[in-house]
Amino acid sequence: MGIASLLALAPVNAATAKRQSASASKASVKRAPPAKKVKVAVRKRASIRMVSAPAKLSFGQMAGLHGAHDALDLKSSVALVMDQDTHEVLFSKNESAVLPIASITKLMTGVLISEAKLPMDEVIAVSQADVDTEKGSSSRLSVGTELSRGELLHLALMASENRAAHALGRTYPGGLATFVSLMNAKAKMLGMHDTRYVEPTGLSSKNQSSARDLATLVNYAYGDATLREYSTSTGYQVAVGRRTLQYNNTNRLVKNPAWEIGLQKTGYISEAGQCLVMQAKVAGRKIIMVFLDSAGKFSRLGDAERVRRWVESIPVAPKVSPLASNEAAPKV
């Protein structure tokens, strides 16, 4: 057979081979045993979407106070800076706004306990009545813990211990209602007309005040050596049964060598935002600072730093001698 004939037959042979291969494949498929049907349980992975709850607005945010701008760009919606000696207001921002003050409340609690001259070594037991039912906050002072009145006062002022503050008010002569009544009477006596207390810890948002009133309270409390010492100590240990509990100051600025703080108190609940009051010596001047409703965890401390740098930048007017004048003092 010639080459031409082979080329003519090639497509036919290829097609035939393809049909035969397909038939064989089909036959082999028919001969294969039927596959057993196996039910496979397919477990769908649950799709979990993390939905964060919207942050609870503070009273200041709801009132629109955060919209106020100031020259120092403070993050606190309320602020007041005052010269303690002259009572000159150096800086103010929404200083008349009345807001929840959180644990700044404990400063008034400390004033009453210290001034009552009750025995500081008297042992007080933490009771179920001291457990926070307002916010459900935790405490390392379990029910039944026994500490002296002085230890409880130290923890309330330095570490903002809620059960300690409540136990101090509860065991005051006359009971808790009498204590709260005296807190309000003391505020009125000091001229704190914007201030109201309903309990001694600050957990209730009904404990409210203004920056002006709190500056008055800081100025007054600074006169008590016990309050100065307890509120500014960097750390404190208490023995609870066989354990020793270490507490630290809620205000990290007390450990900062750049600061000379004479009295301080921090506070926070969601309705109040981050709060801070302080007496500090800055550039040789005794300064009272009040910051309320700050929007970040560390922003109240940042605001204090801004104010300190600003006060340090203020030129100090030279002191003029009483005899200094354009005319020479008359000779005697």
Image: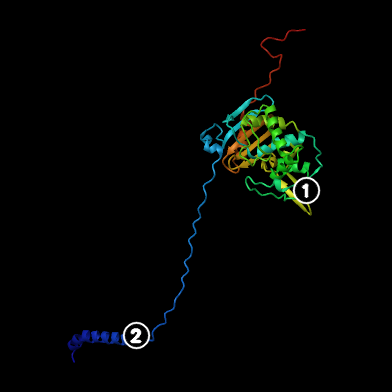
Bin the neighbour count of mark 2 within 10 Å (Cα to Cα): few under 14, some 14-19, many 20 and up: few
Which of disc 2 and disc 1 is earlier in sequence? 2
Q: Is residue 38 visible?
A: yes
Q: Position of residue 132 (x, y in %)?
A: 66, 46
* Residue behind mark 1: 146
Residue 43 at x, y = what percent? 48, 69
Q: Splitting the image into 4 quarters, where does residue 320 fall? A: top right
Q: Nearer the viewer, mark 1 or mark 2?
A: 1
Q: Is residue 186 above or below residue 36?
A: above
Front position in the image: 281 or 206: 206
Spot occupied by residue 78 in the image (x, y as percentages of width and height): 58, 34
Q: Amino acid at mark 1?
A: Glu
Residue 181 found in image quarter: top right
> Can you give x and y, in whole percent of width and height, for residue 31 in the image?
35, 88
**SS for callout 2:** helix
Let me know if residue 262 appears in the view: no
User: Is the residue under label 2 in contact with that under label 1 (CB below 8 Å)?
Assistant: no
* Residue at the image point whose x is 65% and y is 23% from the top: 317
SS at mark 1 in the image: strand
How many labels sit on residues? 2
Residue at image coords 47%, 66%: 44
147 or 72, nearer to the observer: 147
Q: Quadrant of the N terminus?
A: bottom left
- Quadrant (top left/top right/bottom left/bottom right) for the C terminus: top right
Residue tagged 2: 29
| Residue density around tag 1, few if under 14, some if 14–19, many if 20 or more, within 10 Å | some
Q: Is residue 107 left or right of residue 67?
A: right
The residue at 75%/41% (across/down) is 171
Instruction: Report the Cα–Cα distance between label 1 and label 2.
Output: 86 Å
